[in-house]
Each structure stands twice: as structure tokens, then as C-alpha cells.
Image (tube, rainbow, N blue to C red):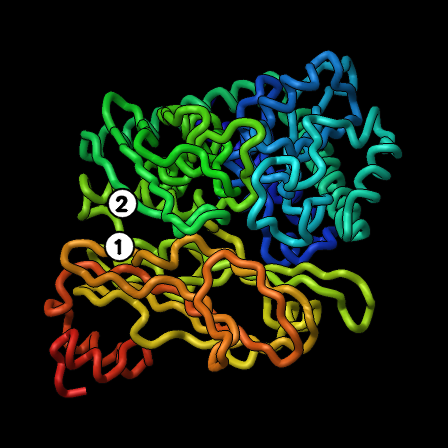
Amino acid sequence: MDGATVEVVRSYLVSAAEEMRATLIRTSFNPVIYEVHDFGMSMYDADLRLVAEATGLTFFLGANDFSLRKGVEYVGRDNLHPGDVVLLNYPYWNAAHASDATLFAPVFWPADGTLVGFLCVRAHWMDLGAKDPGYVLDSTDMHQEGLIFPGTKVVSRGEPVHEIHELIRFNSRMPAEVLGDLHAQIAALRTGERRLLEILEKFGRDTVAAAVQRMIDDGAARSRAALDALPQGSWTAVDWLDDDGIGTEPVRMQATVTIADGEFTVDFAGSSPATAGPINMPFGATEAICKVVLKSLTSPDQPSNEGTVAPLRVKAEPGTLFHAVYPQPTYTLWTGIVAVELILKALARGMPDRLPASSGGDVPGFMMVGTHPDTGQLFAVSNNDPVGWGAAPDHDGIGPANHLCQTQARNTPVEVLEAKTGMFFERVEMRVDSGGAGRFRGGVGLRRDIRFVTPGEFLSVIKKTRSRPWALDGGLEPDPNQVVVFPGTSREARVSTKRTRVQVGDRVTLLTAGGGGHGDPGGRDPEAVREDVAEGYVSPEAAREVYGVRDV
């Protein structure tokens, strides 16, 4: 198989996945899908090996591999037929919480009925009958987190399964949106099916199979060669989550990363046992966050396939924070976001000249739930706010920007939030002095001041507000993320993950963290400090007191 043919076939497969992505964006009902791009879609061969994926949320893409294997195992290959679509959201198989609905479909060659591949689309649904509308912040077992499908056909031999659709409708507070997103995901699968069959017809099944094998072999070889070029050894780091959503005690996370013999091993021994609250990670989700780090180190510019993560080994004992088992709650998976930084923190001990400091430490999420005054319908609309990225050994961190674990995910636009909820944004601006000082400065965070124009509930979802994002090589740590409810009143309070009842006129202030600094601030180029002051990233006072630049 010549390299040119391999690359052409690879490009066709990636293009097909991207067309699936476009179909989902254009047909979905939920802003978290069509605005935020909170989804992931992947293509597989008949042996369940990843061959292509569309640009999507990294955690979702990595989790698709795990959940597809579990779903096919549960349903059974002999029970899959042309036209079938299967729904899976059982957390421990789906590698996500119950609202992240995975739909997968087999693809058969029309002429002889041979199974030639699988397609998978995962997206967040806003309500599937959990105990609370919107996000569940304090569940104590899986059954409080929504209606569960272990691998259930929603389309059978091309025909919608009416009873299952009605079950979804009657178990959702937002049935029109949820069913609309279900059909959008089915449409994306049908698009992928047509395109995959066209590719097989164009090049021939044998040629495509040979190209896929070459792609996978090349992906594994590239990853192992890149690992061999990195420092070899084991490094350990510890970090803390604010709490588990039930108690108030911080929750310990520990990761030991080993690079040796062409393998990348992440061991979460030393982390907390599974908690009472919903911050526990299904093992497939834990694997997905490790894939994000491995991919970024070894082949960031190459399309993903089965081979690119072949060197990965993940260890987490069942019943612990990073390997939830039934019926442990898993809804608030911000643990994985902080854990990406934890793995990088461990690696930075062995290769500080290659990695940046911490990027905000977490994703500051928020949501409003209420009844819209114009429609009388329930709304639940969320946003993940940007943070500052950590400074690198040779350049400043960017910011505010979505956390590095989110790749192409976007903020929900202010216009959408104001139109679809009872929030009015009085202020959205970059925070001066929020980036960690250093020879290279961390990116700055964001400030939002929100006034409520309708009553409802405001949900803040952050798991790192008590401890600061970490810095490197003498850089300074920035202030952590903060949420202040009812500022300037007798009810003012700082919260992290909390459901707060709000009335017309109430206010909330959100302050997102900047990135950690890299290197001694005294070594920063004075001209760069003056530019920072002129741009509003650094105050004149900080320029003088922290950086020692007096003439600003």
C-alpha cells in the first residue's frame, strides 16, 4: 500500500466524520450542541478500531472507543442489523454521566450484508429525568441522575422504536429539545453511513482495509517513537478537589506517570476512594483524559486512530475516585478536567522545559434553570467560562480561552444566554493581574457580573476554588476561580459547586482563574511588562511591586 493512497483514504474518512459533525450542528435543538459543540463523533472498522473522528470535545472522543466496545458487547453482534441505532448512557459503560447520550450504528455492505464498520455520536442532552433539572450536583447514587439505557435500540432495521421514543418523551422535562437532539444524532449517523459506503465503493473494501491497517500501524509507531524521545522515568503529583458535592472536605487526587519501554502509564493509586457525591469517574472517562495528554505529547498534529493511543496503560482500582462502579454517582465529572492538569503536573517534574504551567486549574461552569416568561417553558442553558492558560518555558499563556482540555468547544454566546434564560450580563471583561506572574506570564482570566431578570436557579459547577493553579520554575500562582453570589449584600457568599435560588434583581459575580507563571518574574523583559500594562493585563502597581519595573 503506497503512502499516497493511504493519505487519500485517510482524508476521505476524516472528511466523512466532519460531514457528520456539520449535520449534527445544523439539526440539533440544544445550544450546548450547536453553539458550544459539546459532542464527539467517531468512525470505526468492523473490529471496533478507531479509523477517523471529527473535531469534538476530547473527553467525548476518547470515551467513544470504550463505550462502543461495551455497547456492542451488551447488544451482541448477531443482534445488530442494517438500519439499527443503539442508545447507551449507562455511566460505567458509557464512560460519562447519564446526560451524555451515545448513539452508535453498525454499517453493512448492501450487496452481501457484511458488517464493515461502526459509527458513534455522543452529545449532551439537557434533561433525561434526573432528580433535578439541569445539572445534578449532589446525587448519591446513579439512579438519581436520569433514565438509564444500557444499549437500547431507538431505531430497529430503519424504523423508529416508538415505545422507546415515548419513554424518553415522558421522562424528560424538555422533551422537544431532547427528542430533537436524538433525531439530530441519528441524522449524523445516517450521513456517516452514506459517506462510508461511498468511500468503500470508490476505493474498494480491500484497499480501504489495507489503508486503515497502515494508518493504525503508523499511528502506533509515531506515538512510540515520540515517547522514546521524551525523558524516561516516573513522576508523581498530588492535587485537590474542593469537595464531592455532599461533604465539605477536600478530595485527594494523585497520579504517577511513567514513560518507559515505549509505553505511557498513568497510575491513580493514592487517590481518594470513591466519594458519596457525584465526582467519581467511570473508568472509560479516566482512560479518555489520559488519551488527551498522551496525544498532545506524541502526535498533536496527526489525525487520531486506534494506533495513536496504543502505548497507553491506565491503572485505577475499582471503587476509587477514578474507577466508579455501580451504583456510585458520576454526574459532576469536573474531576477529569482537574485531573488533566494533575497528569501534566506530574510530567512537568520530569520535563519542565517542555510543558506549560497550570491553565486555570478547572473549567468554571454555570447554568440557569427556570421558566421562560415568553414561552412558559422550562429552560436549562449552560456555559463553560474561559480561563488563562499557563505560561510555557518560552512564551506567555493565552487568555481568556477555553480550558486546554476542551479543544474546539466554545462559550455560549451572551446573546444566546440572555435570549434563552433570565440572565442579563452587566459586565464581561478580562481581569487585570489575574495571570500568574513570571518571566513568562500566565494568561488572564475573565470577570462576569450577572443580574437576574426572572426568578430561577443559578448553578455554579467548579471544583477548584480553594487551591491555586500551579506555576513552574519560580513563577507565581494566580488566584483560583471564584463565584460570589449576592455580592454587596448581607447574603454575600463564596461558593464553588452549588445550586442557588435567585429572584429578580439578584446578582452573581464570576471570576475565572488565570494561568500559572513560568520563571522568576524579575527576569521578565521590562518592555513586555510595559506592553502588559498598556494592554490592561497587568496593573501599574503590579508592574512596580511584582516585576520591579518602575517606569510605567
Residue 421, percent from left and from top = 68, 68
User: What amino acid type should be assigned to the residue bearing mark 2?
Assistant: Lys
Instruction: Kindly identify which numbered label has been placed on residue 470.
Output: 1
Q: Would residue 198 appear left or right of 210 to someone viewing this image? A: right
Residue 491, percent from left and from top = 50, 75
Asked whether the beta carbons under mark 1 and mark 2 sit within 8 Å of each other, the answer is yes
Q: Which of the two discs, 1 and 2, labels the residue nearer the N terminus?
A: 2
User: What amino acid type should be assigned to the residue bearing mark 1?
Assistant: Trp
Residue 168, percent from left and from top = 79, 40
Q: Is residue 334 above or below residue 75?
A: below
> Residue at 81% across / 52% down in the picture?
176
Q: Would residue 316 appear left or right of 370 to someone viewing this image? A: left
> Residue at 61% across / 51% down in the picture?
135
- Neighbor class of circle 1 (other Cα within 10 Å; few <14, some 14-19, many 20+) is many
Cα separation between marks 1 and 2 = 8 Å
Q: Would residue 435 appear left or right of 322 to someone viewing this image? A: left
Count of labels in the image: 2
- Neighbor class of circle 2 (other Cα within 10 Å; few <14, some 14-19, many 20+) is many
> Residue at 76% across / 68% down in the picture?
372
Query: Quick one: SS at disc 2?
Result: helix
Residue placed under numbered mark 2 in the picture: 345
Residue 410, percent from left and from top = 54, 58
> Residue at 27% across / 45% down in the picture?
345
Q: Is residue 517 above or below residue 72?
A: below
Which quarter of the rendered picture does the C terminus lie within?
bottom left
